[in-house]
Image (cartoon, rainbow, N blue to C red):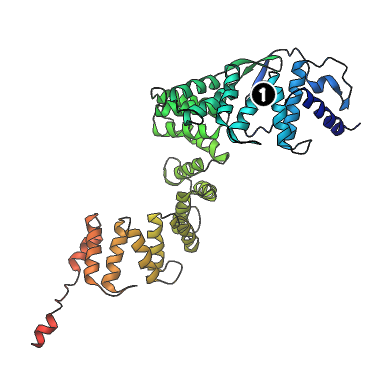
Amino acid sequence: MKIKTIVAVLANVFLISNAVSANEMQAPEVKVQEKNPCKEKTFWQTNFTNGQFNGFYSQMTNSVISNAQHLFANHYFEGSVFNKDLARALDLYQRAHLRGNHDSTAKLGLVYRYGLSTNKDYQKAIRYYESIAANNPEAQFNLGLMHRYGIGTASNQQQAFQYFKQAASNQVVAKNNCEVEVEGMAEAQFHLGQMFRYGLGVDKNLDQALLWFKEAAKQDLKEAQFNAAQLMMTGIGEHYDYDGAIQYYQRAAEQGLAEAQLNLAREYHYNDRQKDYLKAHHWYTKAAKQGQVEAEFNLGLMEHYGHGVYPNYQKALLHYQKAAKTNQPEAFLNIAHIHFYGMGKATDYMQAYQYYQMASNYNLPQADYHLGLMNEKGLGTSVDLDTAKDYYQRSADQGNTDAKIALDNLPVKEPEDFEIAMND
């Protein structure tokens, strides 16, 4: 008999018993190691040898049945082995839960928390989580989230802190008839770090924040690596460690965290201690692909001035235009410069004037100076000395020396009635 056929038959058997499983729904991973030997073999160890079904030669204990129900529920939930059937999965999870299977109980919490295969029901989710919270890190962590953000319950930062602290710490739990030591959950350690960093539910303590970020970083949680790098880079917390911060940014960037890619690129771009234009360009490109506007702008700068690449005004313009879509003032200004000075293209005073105006709305003195110049000379607009004076004055008030000189040299406009007076 084929295994898949056997499995399908067994699924119906376990539906009669009690259970349901599901996709891990990206639930935080709980790392375990066996502390004492298991008292029972699993369903598969007991009833299969080399892929062949042996028949039910041994007694089917409550634990074996509930574990099998959970496993089959997962298959239905994920659509692996069986065709996806969320209703059947939910039924099996509930049956396994009634037999005391904590994995199924935690899964039911997720199912009702996120509305997977059923309507969202935060109160049910909380009840499922609370029923196993004394002995289940996943439940502790999710209760921490729900109390922190007020999901299905009033926001309670102190209670959230306690749940995160439980889940973040190593603990011994009962699992599948084994006594196992569970490593602290990285996600809980990260949230604990956040609460210490910002004083949520506990007194603010940056040293403790850094400690917990580092614990989560050991498990390669990129958000924790990023936050640890921030604290170490700025010297906030126990120690300033520039090299260590760069390493954390690097690890988070390699895992695809856009903010880490941007910060790493900044260091390679601007910091003399770490300057490497090629690496800066590499990480800006990675961050820009994930929508980091500052990365687009800085790529424009590097193409504009030939940092790490040959100068390419057309590429610079494209990057500036992408940044300008999110109303970045400096992008408006640099686009205007390219049009005004004809960098890599013919001059276009009309376009330049438009972009200088957009930059001027953000009080950039260089934009005001150029608008003054264009109104004085009639570039992209008609000559208007009054408007030129106003723009020069705005720029000069912000400390622009060129604007102050232009004001001193601005031609005096003749009174409008001068010609009439001469003809009288």
Q: Position of residue 232 (x, y in %)?
A: 43, 31
Q: Position of residue 113 (x, y in %)?
A: 58, 32
Q: Furthest residue to the bottom?
A: 423
The C terminus appears in which quarter of the rendering? bottom left
Position of 83 compared to 162: left or right?
A: right
Q: Amino acid at mark 1?
A: Asp
- Total tally of numbered discs in the picture: 1
Q: Is residue 64 above or below residue 259?
A: above
Q: Position of residue 237 (x, y in %)?
A: 40, 27
The N terminus appears in which quarter of the rendering? top right
Crowding near pointer 1: few (<14 within 10 Å), some, many (20+)? many
Report the front residue among 103 and 183.
103
Residue 409 in view: yes
Residue indicated by mark 1: 103
Q: Is residue 123 above or below residue 280?
A: above
Q: Quadrant of residue 172?
A: top right
Q: Furthest residue to the right?
A: 1
* Residue located at (56% from left, 32% from top): 221
Report the front residue among 195 and 210.
195
* Residue located at (73% from left, 28% from top): 92
Q: What element does badge 1 sit on?
A: helix
* Residue located at (60% from left, 17% from top): 135
